[in-house]
Image (spheres, helix red, strand yellow):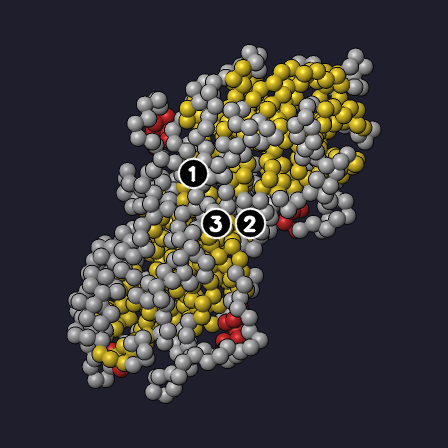
Amino acid sequence: MTDGTGRRTPEWFARRTAAEPAWTGQPLWAWGPPGRRPRPLPARPGPYQPVPAWVTALLGFTDDRTGRPRALVTSYAGARVVLDLSDGGLVGAVDERAHARASATTRIDGEQLVVSGAGAGYLQVSDLDSGRSRWRQWCGDVRSLATVTLAGRPFAVLTGGSPHLEIWSLGADRGARLHTLRTGSERISVLAATEAGEAAVLAVGTSTGRVSLWRLEPTPAGDDVRVEPLGEYGFEVSGLVTVLGFADWHGRPILLGAAGRVARAWDLPAGRPLGPAFAAHTGQVNSVLAGRLGERTVLWSGDDATVRAWLPETGRQLGEAFRYPYEAAPTRTIGVEIGGRPMLVTGDGAGLVWVWDPERPYPFRRDLPSGDQDLPSSDRDLLSGGRGDRAPDSLGVSGYRLAVASPAGQPVLLAALPGHPVRGFEPATGAEVELPPHGVPDGSTLVPGEHPVLAGIGPDHVELWDPATGDRIGPVPLGRNRPGHPGTALPDAAGDSGPVGPVGAGLLGPVGTGLLGPVGTGLLGPVGTGLVDGRRVLLVADGTALVRVDVATGRLDRSPTGHSGRIRGLALGELAGVPVGLTAAEDDTVRLWHLDAWGSSGRTVLDGHGGAAYAVTTATVHGRGLVFGAGRNGQVRCVDVTDLVRSKRAGRLGDVEPDAGGESDGPAAPVADELPPEPVVVLTATRPVRSLAVVRAGRTDWLVAADGSTLRWQPVGEPGTPGQTIEVGAPVTDLVALPGVLVVAAGDGLLGYRPPPDRTG
């Protein structure tokens, strides 16, 4: 695939998504007690990852043909794309053989085009959509660039960092240098320009904290430009001027600028500062712009950790800083209007672009400062945020636990609240359905998995029922060691077997207070169920170890090796035709277990979750078996384990093989030609991720991650394509995917969502 110039581009650069129908993110249905059900909010765009590395420049503009807000995004690696800010569609990739350092848009012969300057010394004009280069001219090194239109003719002013400016005509004559102007003895660091009637005002920032103003006006013939000085401003610091820009402040033109950690505004007609400098930032300021916060007109400025609102007349901050929790720091912030609302767009060091509303500032965090008397009550409410959306601990979850059963071949959603009967719901409508009679006590526990069961806890056993049929599966004896029940001997970590303990003190702990929880209080640890060779098994997390229970015989088998930290998440599934279990633990790892070869050790397939892994899930996408893990740092990592699972089935992986007596000599060496799978980061949330699910829409698989009260949607296997973010207004406790529907347990209720439209057409 080429970009229109014959140059081959990545497929995801050329993909067009702007024409897709908008997805509002409104739920299909909501269920919960009146006044306490989750509060569904509309989807917000992004974040998007349109460029592969550090965002060095963001340029916002409105497309003349469509009226849609767009941004030109430039990365440190040289990639430049046009991003539709309404839906995240990649409109086009701008051709730039040499890395662009500065860009602007202008109209040439009635057509909206991109003007850019490169460190390699070229001035270039390119199409917005195709990225095709119209013309290129050698001009020397370009570090900052601004465009103006005078007497209907487009001009560019640029600098390479020396004390000199160059003025170029951008007409259909393929560009021509008109003037070279020396502005002083100091090196120029940044330029900005604004049109003022028939003339234009140019601001020039230097390496020593000085800002000079220049008037540009056309000659009578309109084919040349006259330049004259207007005055000079200065910062209190003598450092490099990093930001310059023009804005309107209550009907008056102002100049905005930053040097080091200081930002300020100047009243242009009066020729003096609008107020004191703003010096609350803790890092170098990289953005200054005018915008709104609620009903207040404010200035926004950003550094590498925060974005702050302040008033230029007082130089005082309005509310607390919007803090960025992700490790890749913000690099640029601009203001746009989307759907009639003022929004902020922030690029960061990972190539991500976030579109966010200060009233719902995800991914930014905010806290109201104590004793702030300058804020009116409306702004105080606006900035207070914090609806208690701290995600609950995965142990002792108090919200609904979800699973899917299939009575009469139709999927039914099962939802269990500790201490209450299990309820059934029709997935597409949220209507309650009657479950088969089964006589399970109210204190029963829903055990999720590929084949969920309902568990009622007895003093020395667990009674199991099939929720799909209402049939009693039978008791699983978990009491003390008795003859005839080999499974009641639980191997310890060293491989030896010993009695489980007195009646009720095995997996149940003291009567009804062990891994399956006190009667009526639900799960204390991750538990799952599935089928292995047609036999139903339970997987139970016992601290750092994993125990497999054969439901038919009651046999308990502890895994030969365990995690070095407590298990926090568990999933069962079938990958490449092999039944597997997966565990996420506080030792920062996700392990893969072969359920049909329980004597084998678990294989670590993922790590790097910031010190602890909390959630894990599996999916088969385009025939490949994928494992997704997430945890403390909010990164969702994915690994393809298809070949690993197949090699295990073929006997090529040398794991622990127990002898006839149930003992092992330890793990054998792995086969030399087997390489560990290479993980990739699929998405990054800003809080610990505790729930994951993969839901299919047509031929597109969507990964959904829950961090706190926020759902992050990302198409699997489509790098660079836009995701979606939804806030549900209550902490998310569980997710479950059904065909074409994602069900979310949040707070005291449930929400059913249809995935975004199929992206494959």
Left or right for 171, reference 373 = right
Report the amino acid beneath label 1.
Answer: Arg
Report the amino acid beneath label 2.
Answer: Asp
How many C-alpha atoms fall within 10 Å of the one at disc 1: few (<14), some, or many (≥20)?
some
Q: Position of residue 141 (x, y in %)?
A: 72, 36
Q: Position of residue 309 (x, y in %)?
A: 45, 28
**Residue at 61% from the left image edge and 18% from the top image edge:** 232
The residue at which mark 2 appears reads as: 758
Of the numbered discs 1 and 3, the one sitting upstream in the chain is 1
The residue at which mark 3 appears reads as: 684
Q: Position of residue 703 (x, y in %)?
A: 48, 53
Which label was assigned to residue 323?
Answer: 1
Q: Can I make out residue 479 in this image?
A: yes
Q: Is residue 243 above or below residue 676?
A: above
Residue closest to the far right = 173
Which label was assigned to residue 693?
Answer: none
